[in-house]
Image (cartoon, rainbow, N blue to C red):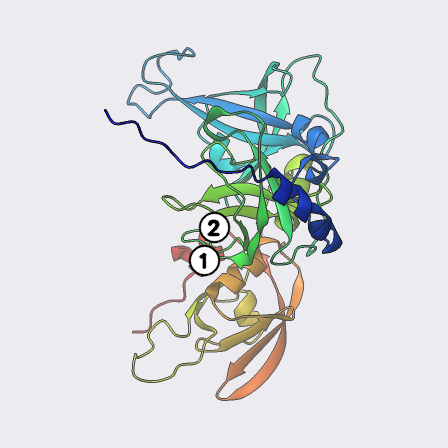
Amino acid sequence: MPHIRFPRVKPAYPLVFGLLPWVSALGLRPAMAEDVPSWLESARREVVAVETMERPASPLEGLLPHLPGEPGASQGRGAGFRCLGEGLIVTSAHVVQDAELLRLRTSEGDVWPARVVGLDTASDLALLSVRGQGWRPGTGLVLAPDDVLAVGDPVTAIGHPLGLEGTVTRGIVSALERSLPLADRIGFIQTDAVLQPGSSGGPLLDGRGRVVGVNAAVARHMQGIGFAVPAKVARWVLSRLGSGRPIVRGSLSAAWREATSEASWHAPARGGVLLGGLAPGGAAARAGLRPGDRLLALAGRPVLGTADVSRFLLCTTPGETHEVRFERAGRVERVILTLDAASGEDELRGELPADRRPAARP
């Protein structure tokens, strides 16, 4: 075999160190240890692994005992974090909603059985408590005030992806009020901080270590696209779950659809939301709204599509009064509407239950 000689390359160290003064003068610096936030390690200690055990539905469900590790049982894993004091743990509803057994694993390696205090599938949030003596509640993470985020802000995600406990990833806010199929009632935070299965339920933190979101979903087969439930939604939901109160949301008592759902490809169409059937004697009917009215704003918030109506109702309660701005026959009008009690999540999507639909005309 012939002997091959490679040309010698002089080390680049003198060049690199010679550039450092210029980098400093320009206000630039490489990402080093000093970039790590001072609050990060304490925040990691507030995050726990949420481990679940469940088994598929069976005709014999409830007749036979189920033991941990039993063949046919499946294990799941997510994350959660201490919040609200008193040892309560925030996580994602989809992590625990089918769990038969539930336990928490702390950053110190301790394992504690847990139970679900409350769960809300509409927002994909759940609240857990520890079962047993000796649990140290910790200081807990703090929910950030509403609307403190802007696109481009730095964020940090902490979770347990693929069983790798205490994993930290960093990124930015890619978008706000993002809709997802089957979950357009939640205006998600989109981030490029890496999220993986097992990250769900962990916190998304701003530059001051405050919780701005609860990590909820990732875009399959795509890197750099993750989603979190905003803190303003979490605050509203968790305050009710923590008090033991059932969550009953407000309702317009009306069906609605996108104004452009039947638009032609060859002609312009106006956006917004059109009211469909109104429940007799319901909130929309009492306020004087009619089928075909085009909703423009709810409580001062612009309505550009059906997702805006769903997001508005997500954090409302029956009896609240709000101004509704709408268009009818080319004229913009306003009315005050008092919300009814929603009988289910379908009413957050603009679908009336069968017993509340208007009678069909003969």
Find the distance from the CA under tag 2 to the CA under tag 1. Answer: 7 Å
Packing grade of label 1 (10 A; few <14, some 14-19, many >=20) is many
Residue 221 pos. (x, y %): 36, 44
Image quadrant occupied by the C terminus: bottom left
Instruction: Name the residue located 45 percent from the left edge and 34 percent from the top edge.
Output: 197
Q: Is 229 left, or right, of 20 in this rendering?
A: left
- The N terminus lies in which quarter of the figure? top left
Residue 279 visible within the image: no
The residue that disc 2 covers is 345
Q: Which mark is residue 233?
A: none
Other-residue count near label 2 (Cα within 10 Å), few / some / many at <14 / 14–19 / ≥20: some
In the image shown, does 84 or 22 lie closer to the viewer? Answer: 22
Look at the picture and state if 292 lies above or below 77.
below
**Secondary structure type for disc 2:** helix
Q: Name the element at disc 1.
A: helix
Query: x%, y% of residue 357?
Result: 41, 62
Q: Which quarter of the figure has residue 110?
A: top right
Q: Contact (CB < 8 A) between labels 2 and 1? A: yes
Report which quarter residue 265 is drawn in: bottom left
Compared with residue 245, is residue 151 higher up or lower down, i.e. above or below?
A: below
Q: Residue at 42% of width from left, 37% of height from top?
A: 7
Camera-nearest residue between 46 and 319 = 46
Residue 349, label in figure: 1
Report the amino acid beneath label 2.
Answer: Glu
Q: Compare residues 92 and 97 and report the one nearer the observer.
A: 92
Viewed as shown, does residue 116 lie left or right of 261?
Answer: right
Disc 1 residue type (three-letter): Arg
Looking at the image, the residue that sits furthest to the bottom is: 330
Q: Is residue 290 at all visible to an observer of this figure?
A: yes
In the displayed structure, does residue 80 sit left or right of residue 74? right
- x and y percentages locating residue 319 in the rendered image: 65, 58
